Structure formats: structure tokens, C-alpha cells
Amino acid sequence: MGRTDSLAKLALAYGVHLARRRLSRPRSQLDDLFDTYATDGIRALQPAERERHPHLVGCINCGLCALAAGRIGQTRLSDLASSYMRLYARLGEASSDIEGDAPDLEAAASACPVGVPLVEVAAIVRRMTAG
Amino acid sequence: MSPPSDHDVCVIGGGVTGAGVARDLSLRGLSVLLLEKGDWGAGTTGGSSWMIHGGPRYLEFDWDTTRLSTQDAGYIVSIARNLVYRVVFIIPVLPHDKNNIERMETAMEVYDRFQPLKKAHPHRRLTAEEARQAEPGLTPDVIGAVTMEEWGIDPHRLVYANVEDAVAHGARAMNHTEVVDLVRDGGKVIGVRYRAADGAMSEARARVVVNATGPWSPRTSGLAGLKVELRPAKGIHIVYPHRISNFSISAESVDGRDLLMVSHAGFTLLGTTDDDYYGDLDSVDVLEDEVDYLLQAFERVFPSIRDYRPVRATAAVRPTLFKWRRYEDELSRRYQVIDHATEGVEGFVTIAGGKLSMYRLMAEQTSDAVCRKLGHQGPCTTATSPLPGNESEMEPAAELARRCGIPALAAVKLQSRHGTRAEKVLDGGRASRLVCRCEPITEAELAYSTRHEQVRSLADAFRRVGLAAGPCAGAACVMRAAEVIGTELGWSASQRFASAREFVRGAWLGRAPVLGHAGWAQEELAQGAMRGLFN
């Protein structure tokens, strides 16, 4: 009974929806989507970042990059990839952690046993924390 | 055996429902004993999808379930602001999906009517191109998409916040304490007999005993010679130690089920399965076939999914109410409060079925039933009384970080677990040094959790503060964490070592089914870092 009632109500809603679609002109809702959730830190990766993303999040936190090149701002390099690159919704609140000098990220990346491209990681984290 | 303690109510089961019942009754002024055989939220609650959601899926079956769970989700969002975050789904529509884009948008339009109840925004409709701008990883085959908003939550912290508040209002709560028998007087249940963490047997008397043991309910009710019938359903999730996307994504499985890739606070859950389960509730294994079933579905929508390295898988059993003949997925997530007096057993109440999103309502109705039995007048206040850490607005994380000398990200995470009580956690005089760098967790927080939040093992710390939940899966932190916890609990060196070994072995069971190429490389590193633990 509950299911029959639910399906009947959905069928009615479907008819109303189709009629509305025929009578109205659709507009893009993408900007609305981004605006609505910007304060929640929900932002899109760029296509190039997306393609590289599995490598960007491959850190296993062995710490070798930190031994090779130290810190970015106040943050140990290995934390950048293992912690900040996890894209927390509230990442923007942690921007102060990575302000300041950037170390030799190429040298750090060359020490990484799983090939995390730290130059790109730093760029993305900075973009995401900047909002 | 020590003389029995006396309580108004004894609640068996420290999942979210049992903890919710204990909190509710304590707030109503009753004396409550809450007992959990494992750790808080370690069973079904922790193995959930970590969402309080209205369940648009139920619109096909039962709008009332959608309304009730949406409304209750709204209450939880208000009382547990530090624990929740928005989860925004992109629901892509592909050729040959069971629902076309118009049907999908219709469902979302209907769901939008319920969204204000949980303070969520209405859906958006995206063209194929727009969907791939929002999430470039979507397949080029996508026809269009709609979005949907839900709330993510840390269920372990939600359970503990309920326990903490119950204790603050006079309850006694003990984890790692197993009820082995019910104490009976003729046809009446008058208490429980339990084994504490140290192995000591004790008895507690209670005017009413509540069975809130989820899938274990039939076993618990069996102690009173009663039959509670469930249709337990197993569900697994694959866990990635990072967000794969800032958007969550849905996919249709090969058998037409809706699966979800949920972006949580720094990690991703991909699930879930839904299969009748007849095995041992205390040992639920993840099968490689189940992992492949999930990956197959998501590969169609998000082709690069197999390039990502999962860190573990979880398995749990849902306490679904019994119904013959239906497919598992079609079973209702409704719940039932059973007063066993109707079967001739006084003083014993079971809460069965339900879902995380409705835990508060389930707890309220169970507590109402208990109060009726006791003749106790006391209104339920759990919909409006904030959980610990939500009594006032949180300060900006950067300020807390500066004042306490910790990274801002550590402050963000600390606030997400403890809310406005975050600074108090760091007040213990312990170093603010990071012990788990992936999460990140300070030594002070770990010590606090051991001292004040009933952490008795590394696995408890995983649940309470997220220890070893990150990309290193514990390789870099379990030994140090064992030192911190061991110092608090007075462990010897060998006890600390044994604790780390127990954790590593337990974690391996969840990791083995999802290990791919990169996973094995990490495993070698982890085993190198922990050499000696496996001897």
C-alpha cells in the first residue's frame, strides 16, 4: 500500500515536471552550484589536476621528502601530501600553515619512492586553501 | 562478585541507538547504566556510510521514512554542528541507466520539498558538459546530471558525544563490558549480569532493561527466551584515505542498485553492498568479489577509480526488520520498539531496525516506551539540547592554532571532533606535538582521549580521534601512539608492543581485500617500519 501510494505520487510529480520542462526555458545552474557550496570548500579540480590526481594523492607518508627538502612554510613537506592534499572541506582555514618560503620541491619529489609530484601538490593545495 | 548496582534503566548496546537512548533517559532525569561489549560505535554504526541523510531512495517505497529521517537529520545538524559537513552529490545519468534524466530530476524535485527540514539546499540540474566541469573525472558518456545535498558525520564521535552527555547527566557508561545474562525474577527481567574489561563479573539491577544491540538483538532477546526476528544485511565500504573528488558521486551497479562514492572530511567511502547475512556477527569479512562489484559500478561512471589506492575496507551488518521475499535493497529501514510485556516478559524493551539518520527519533520513542513503563513524566529534549562541544559558536581555527601552538589544520580537525571544547583537550599539559601526522592528531589529544574518553586500545583511538586513519595507515604513528596511550594506562613495554601488534593485525584484515599494486608497495614500507611486530 505504501509503495503503491509512493509510486502514484511520483508519477504525478513526473507529469508536472515534464509539463514544466516543456513550458520553461532551462538556464545554466553550474555557477549557482559553485556559489552555493564555495563556503563549504567544495570546489572542482581542474581537468589537468584531475588527470594527475591519483598520483597527487599517492603519498604514503614515509617522510623522505621532508628529509630531502624540509618544510613549506611551517608545514613538513610529507604532511603537505599526506594531510593537506586530502582536500578537507575546511582546508581554507589552514592557509596560514603553508604561507612562507617554498623549499626545493623538485629535490623533494626526486626523493619520493612512490613518485608524488610535489610541485603540483603544492600548487593545488595553495589554490584550494586560497579559496 | 561485587553487590549489584541499582539503576532505573540498563541499556545494552553502545551503538548510536543505545547511546542515544542513554542520553535521552539521562536528560529526563533517570539513572542509566549503558553497557557495550566492544567499543562505542564499533559495530553497525561505525560501518555505515557516515551520513545522516533523508534517503531519496525511500521515495519509491515510503515517503514517511524520508520525511521522518529528513526531519531528524535536521535536529542532528542543529545539535552536533561540529560533527557535520555538507556532502554534495553529482548524480550522473548515463545511457541505459534505469532512470533517465527527467525521472531523476523529478525525484530530486520531490526530495527538495524535504530538504529544508535538514537545512539543505535544493538540487541543481547540469548538462553533460557542466557535469564534467564540476567533476572532470566523470565519463564522457554522461548525458546529464542532477545534484543532491546530504550531511556527512563522524558516527564514532556522534556516539561518543551521546555517551559523554549521558554521563554528564548522571549515567554510568562502560565499554568493553559484555552482558552475559539477564537477571530474571519469574517472568520479569530485573537486571543484567556482565563481564567488565578486566574480566570481573558483576550484576546490575534495573527496573527496565533496553536491548539496543542492533543485529545482535535476536541473541540478546534470546537471553530472556524471546524471539526478535531480523533480516540482517551485510554492507561493505571501500575506504580511500583522501577525497577523490570534492563532490560525491552516485553510480548504478550491474544489478541496478544505487551506489555512492561519498566525499567525507579528508577521505572517501565507496559503497555499499546489501546482502542477506547468515554468518558470525562478530567476524564479518570483506570479500574480494564485493570489492570488485563496487569498483565495476564506479569504473563505468568514473573511469580512473582503479588508479586510486584504497587504504582499507569496512564491513558491517544492518539490523533490518524481517520481511519475507523482498530483495535486500527493497527492505524498509523503519524501526520497531517492542515492549516484551505483551509476550509475558516484563521489564524488557527492544529497539530493532532503523538507520543512523533516525537514531535520535528511535531513541526518543524507545525512551517514551521506557518512561511509560516506569510511570515517569519527563519530556524529551534531545532535539534541541546541544551535544557536548556545541554549546556556543566555535572560534576561527587559525586563532586556536596560534594560541595553542599547533598547525591550523590540526586545529580544524580538533574542532571537528571536540567543537568548542577543543582548547580544553590541549590543556592537559602534554605536548602539542603531532603523533599522527596524516590526520593530524596531537599527543595531548590522544592522552586526553585515553584519560577522559575511555580509549583502552589503539583501535579505540582510531575510532575516537581517527588515529592511523590517513594515507600511512598507521605505519608512521602506531608505535608512538602506543607509547602515549601506554603511559596514560600504565602499560609495560611489552604491553605497548602487544597493543601495537594487535592493532596492526586487526588493520590488516580490513586492508588485505583492497590491496592493489601501489597498496603492496605501501604495505612493504609499513611492515619495514613496524618490523618485529609480525614475529
Image: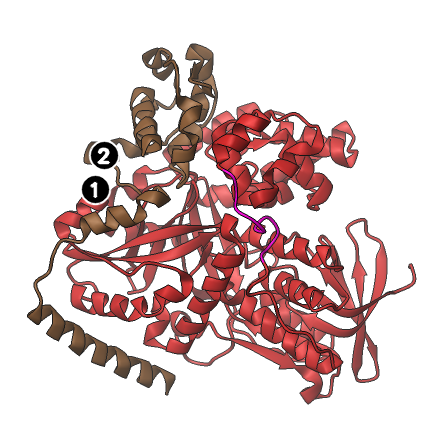
**Label 2 sits on residue:** A51
Q: Percent from the top left, x then y, of residue B309? A: 38, 37
Q: Give me the chain that's brown.
A: A
Residue at position x 34%, y 38% from top? B308
Q: Do the CB atoms of the residues marked 1 and 2 lie less than 8 Å apart?
A: yes
Label 1 marks a residue whose chain is: B
Q: Which is closer to the viewer, label 1 or label 2?
A: 1
Q: Quadrant of residue B424?
A: top right
Question: In the rendered structure, which amino acid carries the disc numbered 1?
Answer: Pro
Q: Give me the chain that's red.
A: B
Pick the front one: B393 or B31: B393
Q: Percent from the top left, x then y, of residue B359? A: 54, 65
Question: In the rendered structure, which amino acid carries the disc numbered 2?
Answer: Glu
Q: Percent from the top left, x then y, of residue B435? A: 59, 28
Highlighted magenta segment, given as a residue range: B386-395
**Label 1 sits on residue:** B136
